[in-house]
Image (tube, rainbow, N blue to C red):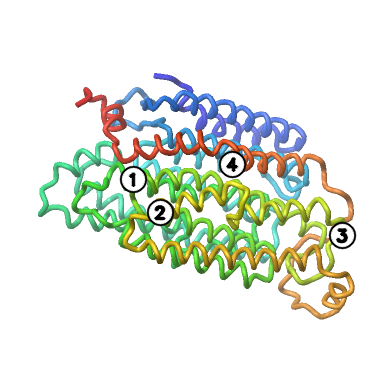
Amino acid sequence: MSHLIVTPVVLPALLAPFIIMALRHHLDLQRIFSIAGTVALVAITLALTVQASDGSVQVYDLGDWPAPFGIVLVLDRLSALMALLTSLLALGVVLYAVGSGWDERGRHFHALLQFQLMGILGAFLTGDAFNLFVFFEVLLIASYGLMIHGGGPKRLRAGVQYVVYNLLGSTLFLFALGTIYAVTGTLNMADIAVRVAELPAEDTALLRVGAVMLLLVFAIKAAVLPLHFWLPASYANAPLPVAALFAIMTKVGAYAILRVYTLAFGPDVSATQGLVGDWLLPAALLTLAVGSIGVLGAREIGRLVAFGSIASVGTLLTSIALFTPEAAAASVYYMIHSTLASAILFLVADLVMERRGGAIIAQRPMPQTGLIASLFFVGAIALAGMPPLSGFVGKLLVMDAARDSDLVWSIWAVILISSLITIVGFARAGSILFWESHDAAHAREAEPEPDEEDEDLPPPVSAPASNLTFVAIFGLIGGLVLLTVFSGPAMNYATATADALFDPTAYIDTVLKRSPQ
């Protein structure tokens, strides 16, 4: 049993309280330890991904209590990939936060960031449904602290709204777990799969109720319409480097749907058959459409990127809802792209707001626009799914996976039309921010704006940003470029991951320590 599997959870769990107790008055030391810890996470998760790349499943029994009685962490291709993606994103965010000085604007930024990583990485690695709930709560508490970092009434209101909606989701999560436990007598996901397969048909009605409630919980976490209402205001009013880290949080919900509904409630389970496709597919298409329309109508740059993220979640969940190995492979590839593209645009949006002193797009001309305009352009074409970056490849893969669906023409139409609307929305915003004449921009600036639109936003910043901020953004863009250039190997990995998801025999046998059938 390799102790390396538990390290991504233990390392930030130890580092966060150490920063609070020993380094709370020494910001420079906080930065050093936070960056060093995140770099170590990247190295550890990279090693875990290499270990899992051969298709083997590894289990870590906490306290040496075997499943289903003890808590287990499980490493396979999907959990290793998501852990690596999280650590790479976190490294970019922490470098940007240090370079931009965002970590100076409130207390305990680095400790909260480490607690957040503990929750996210634990959610990806756990093999137990109840501990999935526990890690959800850890990341919820930490994310609330990060959301209100820097203070201000507008940010506090958005944070309260975020917490209330997610606590409602957590309550529903507990009800779902209680229902499933009442039927199966277990909450270990591999053991649930075994028990569900043995249930007589007449005893599955309550199981379906629990599965539906669980799907609603994951839909809230993934911001699926109509359960998306918490995301635009929360992400737009959070510190935008924090919103960049939050780009992985909607993927926790998407990951949970993939994991639970291929493992515990697999496609062969008659009680839950068709549940994901029948409900999730229309909701995902609606999420994609509304997100793209939100991009077109956004007046604030933070909301512009937030709605772009919602649209990308819609595309991702459309692929997941098709519920085939081909579509799951496309969703794994697109999940990587969507996370990186959303994070890039949130960081670029922060650079824009810092220089313009406000969030409203049609407000004042943007000084020193060259490099930042180029970064915005790259992020926009990535999130909209235009060539030549990986978003275009990802959307083609999703559309190709939908060819055998009865709703293929509807899916293609929504994806293509929404992509066009998103492109127009980003082009409109970019032209106003960067390429509109200064005379027109000054004329608009002279018009009175409502005071509440820009309350508690930072003042204009004339000094150039630290080189560290651009290192972070270019590093994430480099990830997109690598994903595009090596799309073939990436899809091979994604295909092998999807095949293992839809044939979880090895996962179940390894977790429950059964002899292979």
Of mark 3 and mark 4, the one earlier in the sequence is 3
Give me the C-alpha separation between circle 2 and circle 3: 42 Å
Query: Residue 366 is drawn in which quadrant?
Result: bottom right
**Residue 484: mark:** 4
Pointer 2 and pointer 1: residues touching (CB < 8 Å)? yes
Q: Position of residue 96 (x, y in %)?
A: 72, 43
**Residue 367: mark:** 3
> In the rendered structure, which amino acid carries the disc numbered 4?
Thr
70 w.r.t. 428: above or below? above
Of mark 4 and mark 2, the one earlier in the sequence is 2
> In the rendered structure, which amino acid carries the disc numbered 3?
Pro
Give me the C-alpha separation between circle 4 and circle 2: 29 Å
Q: Position of residue 78 (x, y in %)?
A: 43, 37
- How many other residues sit within 10 Å of disc 3, few (<14), some (14-19) or many (≥20)? some
Residue at left offset 67%, top offset 50%: 241
Select label 4 or label 1 by which is in front: 4
Q: Secondary structure at mark 2?
A: helix
